[in-house]
Image (spheres, grey):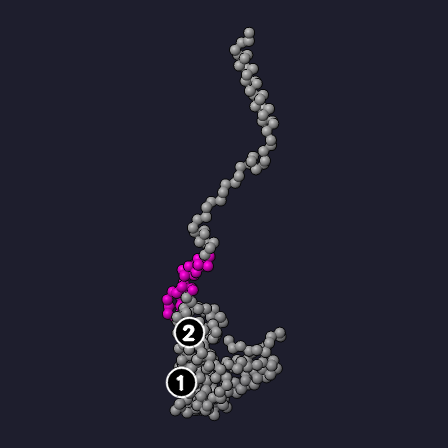
Amino acid sequence: MSSPKRTLHHKASSILQRFIFRRRSDPPQPISSVHPQPPPPPPTTPAVRSLDNNASRIVDEEDKENTVLCPICLEQKPLIECFTMHGCAHVFCMACMGTYVETRVHEGVISIRCPNFGCRATVEMDQVRSIVRLEVYYRWRRAVVRSSMVVLSEKQFYCPYKDCSALLTLDDHKREEEFLCPHCKRGCCAKCGVEWHKGLSCEEYQKSEAAEEGRREAAAFDALVKKERWQRCPACKFYVQKEKWGCHYIQCR
């Protein structure tokens, strides 16, 4: 008769053998079932969805927060409400720039300079079309075209200061007298077409070294124009140099 201890050991051994046999006979598991799957991505937050779907709106919100000091009204204005000059990159708020351009057009100025003090860049007509009234834009455009076609009368001349160049009318003034430009408030001589020659008559000025130097410079420039075959813009009268592969079309800026 076997002892209880031996019987218990025999049963345990049989159970262990059956377990090992069953494990060996099981089909191999795929690798994916052996290695754990990566955790799912975290749910997209509303802020991330807003950034993905409304990027342009978020950029606009950032532009509203960025401000620039307008040198005309001296107020901080949002960047999206500002105007940047193409020629010089000076920045002004659209309201001030529109008012400035309209004022200069009403004054009869054809070549409008940048309002920044001392800047010689000119305002591009097409660039300000969206910030001025349409009637003002077309009035300026007609004035530019008219200035290139009409012959000035005896009482009309352009202000000799390059940063003004307003079309002036003498009215009751004589051409030999000093004429104060109502736009730039500087004196000029309509007969000589130069800045006012204080202390000299027109005849004396024409005999002066300053007048002679001006004539030499004009002659040298005319020779350069003929040599390089420069053409004049029919609107603003500026000389234009054609690039090697450029066309003959001239667009006033």
**Residue 112 seen in the current view:** yes
Label 1 sits on what residue type?
Leu
Q: Residue at x 39, y 71 (%)?
A: 96
Q: Residue at x 41, y 75 (%)?
A: 133
Q: CA distance from mark 1 to mark 2?
A: 29 Å
Q: Is residue 119 visible?
A: no
Location of residue 136 (image quadrant): bottom left
**Which of the image's four quarters has the N terminus?**
top right
Pinpoint residue 234: horizontal percent, then vertical percent.
53, 82
Please tell me whether residue 173 is drawn above or below residue 132 in the rendered image. Answer: below
Q: Is residue 207 magenta?
A: no
The residue that label 1 is drawn on is 180
Q: Name the amino acid, label 2.
A: Val
For marks 1 and 2, give the one nearer the viewer: 2
Give the residue at mark 2.
Answer: 132
Quarter of the figure with residue 10 = top right
149 left or right of 77? right
Q: Nearer the viewer, residue 170 or 61?
A: 61
Which secondary structure lies at badge 1? strand
| Neighbour tally class for label 2: few under 14, some 14-19, many 20 plus, Cα within 10 Å | some
Task: Residue at 42% x, 82% y: name it.
Answer: 108
- Does 34 appear above or below 242? above
Q: Which residues are magenta?
A: 55-80
> Quick one: SS at disc 2?
loop
